[in-house]
Image (cartoon, rainbow, N blue to C red):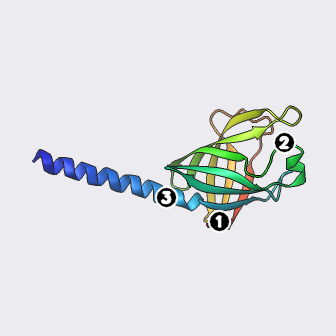
Amino acid sequence: MKINISIFAVIFLSLFSLSNLHAQDNLIGTWELKDGDFAGAQLKVYKDGSNLEGKLITVPQKMMESCYNENDVKWMNIFKEGDGKYSIIDIVKVKGDCSEIYSSKNINFSNENTVSVTAGAINTDPTGGSQKWTKVNSE
């Protein structure tokens, strides 16, 4: 009887893990910032081992002037919190000395191709405000 319960537990946990990874796949792809001073920036969310990470692939001039570069990691520690909801660490660069601030943010899907990024529980981002990102590619 204990063997059956153990097998059931292993199968259940495996399926639960796979369903969580599948749910996170909705965030994988290329996203474009649609508002604010850095509109036009593009970020690619991809799997890095078992985690998700977001790297800048297109950086507008105004963003470069604020110390951002192509291939900079912008989003890290991406965790699914619920249906269409994620928590992330957003790496914010400080213009001038180019230091980095690790800011807690939330991602919420408005629909399958649009997300809003808003301040998280511990927000250290001096710029504040929310951002609207639109998916431009699912790969």
Question: CA–CA distance between discs 3 and 2?
Answer: 33 Å
The label on residue 23 is 3
Residue ID at (79%, 56%): 41
Q: Is residue 7 left or right of residue 87?
A: left
Mark before the other along the chain sequence, 1 or 3: 3
Q: Are marks 1 and 2 in contact (CB under 8 Å)?
A: no
Tag 1 residue: 113
SS for tag 1? loop
Residue 103 in the image, given as x and y percentages of width and height: 69, 36
Callout 3 amino acid: Ala
Mark before the other along the chain sequence, 3 or 2: 3
Disc nearest the viewer among 3 and 2: 2
Badge 2: how crowded within 10 Å, few (<14), some, or many (20+)? some
Question: Closer to the camera, 92 or 118?
Answer: 92
In the picture, residue 91 is in which quadrant? top right
Residue 66 in the image, given as x and y percentages of width and height: 86, 42
Tag 2 residue: 67
In the picture, residue 33 is in which quadrant? bottom right
Disc nearest the viewer among 1 and 2: 2
Is residue 43 depicted above or below 95 in this figure?
below
Residue 136 in the image, given as x and y percentages of width and height: 70, 67
Residue ID at (52%, 56%): 24
SS for tag 3? helix
Question: CA–CA distance between discs 1 and 2?
Answer: 28 Å
Q: Are marks 1 and 3 in contact (CB under 8 Å)?
A: no
Mark before the other along the chain sequence, 1 or 2: 2
Residue 23 in the image, given as x and y percentages of width and height: 49, 58
